[in-house]
Image (cartoon, helix red, strand yellow):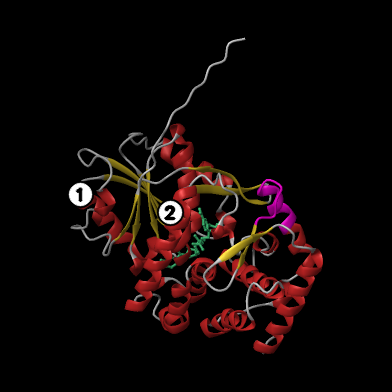
Amino acid sequence: MSKRRVTYQHTIEYEVINTSDLFHPQNWALLSVGRIEDARRFVVVDENVERHFSVEIRNYFSHHHIEAKIVTFPGGEENKTLEHHLYFLRELDSFPIHRRDEPIIAIGGGVLTDVAGFVAANYRRGVPHIKVPTTLMGYVDASIGIKTGINFNGSKNRLGAFHPPQKVLLDKSFLKTLPRRHILNGVCEIIKLAVIKDAGLFDLLEIHGARSVDAHFQDEEGGVILDRAIDGMIDELQPNLFEEELARRVDFGHTFSYGLETRHEAHLFHGEAVLFDILLSAVIASGRNLLSDEETERIFRLVVSLGYELDASLLDPELLWASLTERTYHRNGLQRVPMPRGIGDCVFLNDIKTDEIEFAVKNLEDWIAINYDHV
Ligand SMILES: NC(=O)c1ccc[n+]([C@@H]2O[C@H](COP(=O)([O-])OP(=O)(O)OC[C@H]3O[C@@H](n4cnc5c(N)ncnc54)[C@H](O)[C@@H]3O)[C@@H](O)[C@H]2O)c1
């Protein structure tokens, strides 16, 4: 029997760019990839963004003589479905873009960029796309990497692809209209990064976080926090874009949260589930002397200062254990749970036991009862 070997190397390169006034006719960022002569663009826009920018978006493309098909999308986890995915594919197929140099433009939150990215990955075996995040979750996390996907068969992101964008365009002014709960939702991912890799970012959150949340990150310090979080995210993702390494620091907060957000989809946003996970992990880390009492206290104090609502009744040790078991399977048989070691560093645990989870839930319930009147 003869054996043949096929190898091919492919470089992935894309820019993550800060911009402003994205729909100003003089801003070329949206058209900086692909052809612009006699050109078309398939543009997917979050419904809530379209409400605010309907005229600007249309004017932008007509000003540049681009034939644009603008399709709106209702954000929200419940819409991250195969049905929406197929809907976009049909809409796209009835407006056949040039598959090499007329990128799909995805303007919206993490749900939209995940779905539109998956459309770009599937259509004609892959077409280019540009991501424009309009939520904080998208801005600091969902739009930065190359993961796309939709929920399927009751599981989050069960169908998906690694498909890099051509560009990611960051215009933080979109955050002005984002409801406060969604701002806080995105901040959870910033807290995650701060705790496991960037003590300086944690300090910034402590000092300016509450004011920046109030200002929807339009303030100068808010901009510094966002830039630092994105730099940190890129730093973590870049060497491991395809997740060959399964022990990932950015998975901090993404072990117990998986079960929580799946069961409580109607009540919990992704970041809120991540925050529960961060706090449970902080208790476990403290129990193992990975965090001092003072460091643990700082994490909990930050959460209070930012004004999060926490409903302890959602915590269920059995659910959290099932979530850890599922994530262990996902991580190829080892728990690989990132745990803070001090603030700004982490280790990976492979031996978390049920009683540790029960202990963490009990502690967190007690803490919520003391700190939140409504519980
Ligand atoms: N691909 C990745 O690496 C990655 C990473 C993190 C999260 N995610 C995914 O991101 C999703 C969550 O993203 P999300 O929190 O952005 O949710 P989302 O996309 O559903 O947006 C949240 C809400 O904000 C609205 N909205 C969007 N932009 C707005 C604006 N500028 N003003 C007012 N309202 C606006 C949307 O209509 C929606 O109602 C999850 O599905 C999660 O799995 C993906």
Picture residue at 48% right of the left edge, 64% below the top: 137
Residue 354 at x, y = what percent?
Answer: 80, 64
Residue 85 at x, y = what percent?
Answer: 52, 44
Picture residue at 20% right of the left edge, 49% below the top: 64
Left or right, 180 with reference to 320: left
Picture residue at 43% right of the left edge, 57% below the top: 235
Q: Can residue 245 be seen in this view?
A: yes
Name the residue beneath numbered marker 1: 64
Which of the 4 image quarters holds residue 253? bottom right
Left or right, 287 with reference to 152: right
Q: Give the range drawn in magenta.
A: 324-336
**Eyeballing the image, is 278 above or below 46?**
below
Name the residue beneath numbered marker 2: 72
User: Neighbour class for label 2 at 10 Å: few (<14), some, many (≥20)?
Assistant: some
Left or right, 269 with reference to 286: left
Q: What element carries label 1?
A: loop
Q: What residue type is labelled 2?
A: Thr
User: Neighbour class for label 1 at 10 Å: few (<14), some, many (≥20)?
Assistant: some
Q: Nearer the viewer, residue 368 or 224?
A: 224
**Mark 1 or mark 2, which has the lower sequence index?**
1
Which quarter shows the N terminus? Answer: top right
Residue 293 at x, y = what percent?
Answer: 64, 82
Q: What element carries label 2?
A: strand
In contact (CB < 8 Å): disc 1 and disc 2: no
Q: Is residue 134 visible?
A: no
Task: Specify whether residue 261 is painted magenta.
Answer: no
Q: Which of 10 and 106 is in front in this view?
A: 10
Separation (CA) of disc 1 from disc 2: 21 Å
Q: What residue type is labelled 1?
A: His
Picture residue at 68% right of the left edge, 77% below the top: 311
